[in-house]
């Protein structure tokens, strides 16, 4: 019971942070350095536990929303690190990773490679930045 309550609490906290980032937009940047390491830590620590797949998906969604809010310059390093981590941990291509996960990792807040409004500026297929 305690584990279930903890999980619900963490998921609610991630949703709250996501909502604040959406509303604050660029103003969220001052909280980025305090928030992102913890969210990335949750994301990494949930990778080997099938029971935490939903938490992992919520972390990805929150990371994507925060990245969109703070912009390319602030998010670029963490965005690339997270994408590299995903591909390394799964040994899959991005397309296979996003299409085969359950729950799906692809969120409306995580831009697919073909979208032109990619906030990170990273070409998710090649890993190159837009201005490279």
Image (cartoon, grey):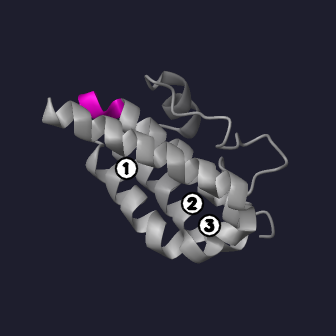
Q: Which mark is residue 75?
A: 3
- Element marked by disc 2: helix
Q: Which mark is residue 128?
A: none
- Element marked by disc 3: helix
Determine contact: label 2, label 3, CB under 8 Å.
yes
- Element marked by disc 1: helix
In the image: residue 107, left or right of residue 115: left
Total numbered labels placed on residues in the image: 3
Q: Which mark is residue 79?
A: 2
Q: What residue is rendered at 45% in x and 36% in y?
A: 57
Residue 117 is situated, as x and y percent measured from the top left of the image, at 82, 50
Residue sticking out furthest to the left: 1
Q: What residue is rendered at 22% in x and 31% in y?
A: 4
Vertical side of 84 occupied by 50: above or below: above
Mark 2 to mark 3: distance in Å? 6 Å
Q: Is residue 127 visible?
A: no
Q: Which mark is first along the chain, 1 or 3?
A: 1
In the image: residue 24, left or right of residue 79: right
- Please name whichever residue, 120 or 59, is drawn nearer the observer in this view of the structure: 59
Q: What residue is rendered at 55% in x and 43% in y?
A: 61
Residue sticking out furthest to the right: 116
Boundaries of the magenta span: 49-53
Residue pointed to by mark 1: 43
Residue 102 is situated, as x and y percent measured from the top left of the image, at 43, 22
Mark 2 to mark 1: distance in Å? 13 Å
Is residue 59 found inside the magenta-colored segment of the image?
no
- Magenta span dominant secondary structure: helix
Residue 49 is situated, as x and y percent measured from the top left of the image, at 23, 35
Residue 21: image quadrant is bottom right
Mark 3 to mark 1: distance in Å? 16 Å
Crowd class of label 1 (few under 14; some 14 to 19; many from 20; radius 10 Å): many
């Amino acid at each position: 019971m305690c584990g279930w309550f903890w999980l619900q609490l963490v998921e609610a906290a991630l949703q709250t942070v996501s909502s604040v980032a959406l509303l604050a937009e660029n103003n969220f940047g001052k909280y980025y350095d305090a928030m992102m390491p913890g969210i990335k830590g949750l994301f990494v620590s949930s990778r080997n536990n099938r029971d935490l797949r939903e938490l992992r998906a919520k972390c990805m969604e929150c990371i994507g929303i925060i990245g969109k809010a703070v912009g390319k310059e602030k998010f670029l390093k963490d965005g690339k690190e997270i994408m590299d981590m995903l591909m390394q941990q799964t040994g899959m291509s991005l397309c296979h990773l996003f299409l085969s996960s359950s729950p799906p990792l692809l969120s409306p807040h995580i831009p697919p490679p073909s979208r032109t409004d990619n906030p990170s500026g990273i070409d998710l297929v090649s890993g190159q930045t837009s201005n490279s």
